[in-house]
Amino acid sequence: MDLFQYDFMLRALTGALVIGLAAPALGIYLVQRRLSLIGDGIGHVALTGVGVGLLLHHSPVISAVLVSAAGAVGIELIRQRGRTSGDLALALLFYGGIAGGVVLVGLSDDSSNANLMQYLFGSLITTSPQDVVVIVVLGVAVLLAMTIFRPALFAVCNDEEYAKVSGLPVRTLNLLMAVTTAVTVTIAMRTVGLLLVSALMVVPVAAAQQVTRGFVKTMVLAMVIGLAAAGAGVAVSAEINTAPGATTVILALVAFVAIALGSGAARVLRRRAHQPREVEPPDVVLQS
């Protein structure tokens, strides 16, 4: 791995590992609430933040965090008011987000297609030291929030009405989850890109669910799978010269398929082992 002697590869690996841990830690709550695709929607909104940053010559990561957090809060408030109108409002917000991002990026000085593609599909090798600091700080913050508030978030994800009766601040917890989702999507855009970020939040969780039953065990295994996929994605992409983000997602999908097939085969073998065997009746010998 001679490539890891370079600073830009070490920065890429650091950012990927942080996202590999943080994304599944948050994704398990989203999967539990059947909001697996919310990352895609917030990613569209984050693109507007990227356009704002490029237009104003500020850090696109920080501006994307602010804009996507505001969008995520708006999504959560809309979701609480009604399902039907919420779906329509979400669609309008998502489409407006990606359209606004494309327009703002086009108006900025850095309006090349390559500059836009690195946010849509990720570009780890162009990650600056400042970007790595932002990714690490925000990633650690997401990890701490998901672990410290795990019991309360778990209760809200399973039954909001029961959580309200229990005295939990449901609205505050929902807003916390919305903001952390926006933060995770934004910092992951340099790793896997805005269009692939949901995969890193959902696929490791789906893979872990094949072999675990408890919430904590599923969360830990999903983080391990995400960490392994992120690290291996950077290493493999460096060897075969492919996009790190797409390679990471493909490896996570390979892990899901392998675990699903393995657990399925194990269930079949256990079922066969516990099936009662047919015993032939003993021969009857008639004595004269």
Image (spheres, rainbow, N blue to C red):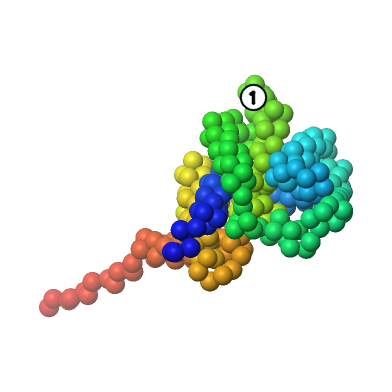
Picture quadrant of residue 159: top right
Q: Quadrant of the N terminus?
A: bottom left
Name the foreground residue: 205 vs 2.
2
Q: Position of residue 14 (x, y in %)?
A: 52, 49
Spot occupied by residue 13 in the image (x, y as percentages of width and height): 52, 54
Give the mark count.
1
Residue 54 at least partly seen: yes
Q: Is residue 227 left or right of residue 193?
A: left
Q: Residue at x 86, y 44 (%)?
A: 89
> Is 217 placed above or below 145 here?
below
Q: Position of residue 115 (x, y in %)?
A: 74, 58
Taking the image as drawn, is residue 35 in sight? no
> Which one is nearer the viewer's eye here, 279 or 210?
210
Single out the residue that lies furthest toward the left. Answer: 288
Q: Residue at the spot x=39%, y=61% of the render?
A: 270
Query: Who's the residue at 48% across and 63% down the image?
Result: 3
* Residue at which label 1 appears: 168
Q: Residues within 10 Å of mark 1 (few under 14, many from 20)?
A: some
- Label 1 element class: loop
Residue type marked 1: Leu
Q: Nearer the viewer, residue 4 or 189?
A: 4
| In the foreground, 34 or 203 | 203
Pick the quarter of the image with the C terminus: bottom left
Is residue 236 rendered to the left or right of residue 285?
right
Residue situated furthest bottom in the rendering: 288
221, above or below 151, in the image: below
Height in image: 22 above or below 98? Answer: above
Please give the name of the residue rendered at 40% of the width and 65% of the height, measured from the top-left corner.
Answer: 269
Q: Position of residue 277 (x, y in %)?
A: 33, 67
